[in-house]
Image: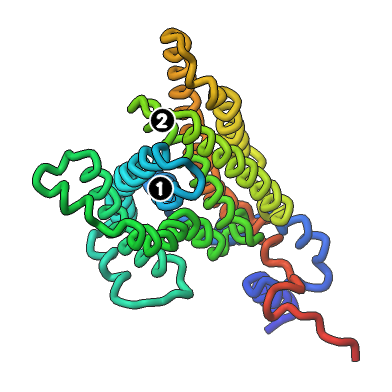
Amino acid sequence: MNRSAFEGFSHSTLARAGGRPAGDRAASSAASAEPYYGIPYLKRPTWKWQIAAYFFFGGISGASFALASLADHFSASPDAAALRRAGFETSLAALLPCPGLLIWDLGRPARFPYMLRVWKPGSPMNLGSWILTGFGAVSALGAAHAAGQAGVLGPLAPLARRLPMHAIGAAGLPLALGMTGYTGVLLAGTSVPAWSQSPWMGGVFVASSFAAASDVLRLHLTVRDQAAPPGMRALDRISHAAKAAETGLLVAHCARSGRAGRALWTGRRGWQLAAGLGLSWAAAALAPAPKSLAARDAGVRSRLKRRTLQAGLLGLAGAFLTRWAIVHAGQQAADDTAAARAAAQPSKSAPGWRQQPPR
């Protein structure tokens, strides 16, 4: 092999191995943001709108069940009963599209039961399949109890009213919390730079789920004319706290991700994420003060009801847009070779990257 052929072979071999020849550092640095022969550094996630919708509805379902189970702890007895019924009904209604969306994304219905053949707590996807299955059962029992309290189950209403909801709520609460956050942990467990560079993505999803569920329950109570000030005050506090936590955790996630997570705050996805957070806070500003809902004037109550409905819809739009932006930012980040390289840099916190002691 002559010298020129050997140098061409060595350069090609080093390029394929991710290395660089000693004399080409400047050229390698300039081309570090370019994919190898047009092939992205990471494989792009194949999730589409079905997964974003699944994350949205699943989070609302889990948070609504949790709020219904804990209604006695933050609301007076009459309001707690209305809040509990609204929470259990909302939980099942939001959960119903979830299996269909998940199976639609998987492509074949048989793939979902295949996940239940094994138990792997270390796998967010496998654990999430078990959480969804178990939570579906307790959510159905909660909705049946609520329907029995309303007397809409006919001869089955007395049986539904005798369900031990304290025990069912206690058993379902961990599953409900899992529904709100396991999807964020699932994203963080991938190699996508925009998702995996901080431990806060699961917390972002939990906070977003409770913020959206609070908005849905306010809508539910308002439509049914059960928007009593004490119960709405509790939902108002929960909504504000959840939105503040969601915003703070997103800022912390982006700050921790650095260059690797720029898809979350630049371009179209960055605008969508900012718009989602803006709509959520606009909903909080638009919602009337809970004590004003007890106004005596019928016209005033009607205007306040319209404002509550508008605020709830704005909050839901913001929560969905936030989930949409986070999921689709992952696809953009996977195409960003520079971001993928930044995410793969050595780190003292990453296993296998410990600095060797000097000799």
Residue at horizontal 46 percent and vertical 41 percent from the top: 76
Q: Position of residue 155 (x, y in %)?
A: 9, 46
Circle 2: is it few (<14), some (14-19), or many (20+) Cα within 10 Å?
Answer: many
Q: Where is residue 141 in the image (x, y as percent from the top left)?
A: 26, 55
Q: In this view, does 6 lie to the left or right of 167?
A: right
Query: Alpha-carbon distance for marks 1 and 2?
Result: 15 Å
| Residue 337, picture quadrant | bottom right
Residue 281 seen in this snapshot: yes
Quadrant of the rendering where the C terminus is positioned? bottom right
Type of residue at label 1? Ala
What count of labels does the image hold? 2
Residue 48 seen in this snapshot: no
The numbered dot on residue 68 is: 1
Residue at horizontal 29 percent and vertical 76 percent from the top: 117
The numbered dot on residue 219 is: 2
Label 1 residue SS: helix
Quadrant of the rendering where the N terminus is positioned? bottom right
Give the mark toward the camera: 1 or 2.
Answer: 1
Q: Nearer the viewer, residue 336 or 64?
A: 64
Type of residue at label 2? Leu
Taking the view exactly as shown, the residue that stands out farthest to the right is 359
Residue at horizontal 82 percent and vertical 73 percent from the top: 22
Circle 1: is it few (<14), some (14-19), or many (20+) Cα within 10 Å?
Answer: many
